Amino acid sequence: MKVVLQRCLSARVEVENHVVGQIGHGLVAFVGVTRLDSPANAAKVAQKIAGLRLFNDEAGRFNLALKDVGGKVLLISNFTLCGDARKGNRPSFMAAAMPEEANALFESLATLLAAQGVEVQKGVFGADMRVFVENDGPVTLILEL
């Protein structure tokens, strides 16, 4: 899985001008599922997202995780993260999982995060989405697990 995490003050996702997911303080996770991913990858990513210390303590250091700050996660499926643009001008998406498999792992990731006590909102898999992120920092991290 490839995940781009952005710390946010607030975020929302809209499909056809309707809000389908919205959070306050927390993380927005853009998730790309590759052909090589498995349920074990989803479990590792969920554990990593829940435990990452990306939030400031009283001294301004990254020492706090989502649960420490009452943060939430907005999950956004994003197959274009699996794109390879090393050759030519049109990216190849051959590394992306087939939609049915990708959706199952995306939903598994949401369930696994929620099981760790993290409130999860999400976009609509495969939909044309508009994502609004009020970045905090900005703090952005790329995970490839």
Image (cartoon, rainbow, N blue to C red):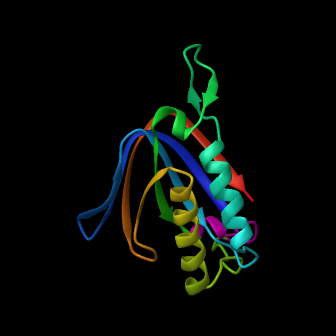
Residue 1 shows in this picture: no
User: Residue 122, relative to residue 64: is it above or below?
Assistant: below
Q: Nearer the viewer, residue 111 or 37?
A: 111
Q: Quadrant of residue 58?
A: top right
64 drawn magenta: no
Split into 4 quadrants, where in the image is the C terminus?
Answer: bottom right
Q: Nearer the viewer, residue 79 or 48?
A: 48
At a point 64% along the width and 27% down the height, the residue shown is: 63
User: Residue 100, relative to residue 113: is it above or below?
Assistant: below
Residue 23 coordinates in the image, percent (x, y): 36, 48
Split into 4 quadrants, where in the image is the N terminus?
Answer: bottom right
Q: How many badges with numbers are in the image?
A: 0
Left or right of residue 102, residue 24 in this image: left
At a point 72% along the width and 79% down the height, the residue shown is: 35
Q: Nearer the viewer, residue 6 or 84?
A: 6
Q: Which residues are magenta?
A: 80-88
Residue 29 shows in this picture: yes
Left or right of residue 89, residue 137 in this image: left
Q: Quadrant of residue 83?
A: bottom right
At a point 56% along the width and 84% down the height, the residue shown is: 99
Residue sitting at the far left: 17
At a point 57% along the width and 70% down the height, the residue shown is: 108
Residue 65 coordinates in the image, percent (x, y): 59, 36
Residue 18 coordinates in the image, percent (x, y): 23, 65
